[in-house]
Image (tube, rainbow, N blue to C red):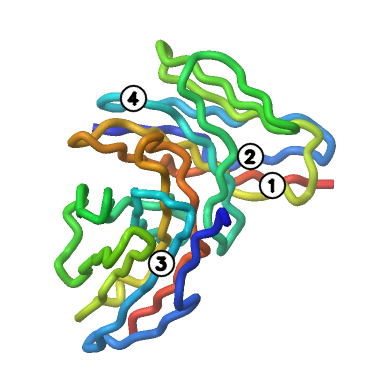
Amino acid sequence: DTEVTQTPKHLVMGMTNKKSLKCEQHMGHRAMYWYKQKAKKPPELMFVYSYEKLSINESVPSRFSPECPNSSLLNLHLHALQPEDSALYLCASSQEEEGRKQYFGPGTRLTVT
Amino acid sequence: GQNIDQPTEMTATEGAIVQINCTYQTSGFNGLFWYQQHAGEAPTFLSYNVLDGLEEKGRFSSFLSRSKGYSYLLLKELQMKDSASYLCAVSNPSGGYQKVTFGTGTKLQVIP
């Protein structure tokens, strides 16, 4: 199983809503990542979890709150988002020992209205 | 800081060969990735170079020169399905962990 899954595929939310994005992998990877990608731009790193602990936070606003309940799951909790937060949110995972080849999930297309 | 440069767009003919260049200036370097991304889809891994030289994988090859801060992706026998964005990304150490920074990507259009 070399797949990273993400749900939902699409999400539309208002600025006062609270929602969560979910990511799952069963490859035994110990590093998991959240990226944000705007149209025609490259993915931008948001968070890195290593062995279920937050290791990198790229100065992301607190309205984005990551969570890693176990080694296979990664969540991104969303609250009080702005329209400019609309983007494709990508989850990825990799073997921490290698720290190299990152497997990406299909992404969640988020629209904030 | 990190600076990764790629051409914005390229056009090539079906069946031909195309070379996509990437230059980088980063604080620390572990390796360089190439990813392919079709519009509206997630990036898919193509290659990872750590050492200088050329690595070939089917129709795709990737070259790295660490001393020059330079890499290229070579696509042979181009097919229409190769029309996509190609992202160069550098892995560097950050606080004891690996961090990957992407370039802006090169949009390749393959024409008949």
Please give the name of the residue rendered at 80% of the width and 44% of the height, measured from the top-left corner: B79
Chain where mark 1 sits: B
In front of the other: label 2 or label 4? 4
Q: Element at badge 3?
A: strand
Kindly identify the amino acid type of the residue bearing the numbered disc 3.
Cys
Estimate the spatial distance between the alpha carbons at disc 4 and disc 3, rounded to whole Å: 28 Å
Query: Residue B109: which disc?
Result: 1
Residue B75 shows in the view: no
| Dot 1 or dot 2, earlier in sequence | 2
Classify A16 as above or below A8.
Answer: below
Classify B61 as above or below A14.
Answer: above
Residue at mark 2 shares a chain with residue at mark 4: yes
| Dot 2 or dot 4, earlier in sequence | 2
Q: Tell me where residue A16 sits by quadrant.
A: bottom left
Query: Residue B10: which disc?
Result: 2
Q: Element at badge 2?
A: strand
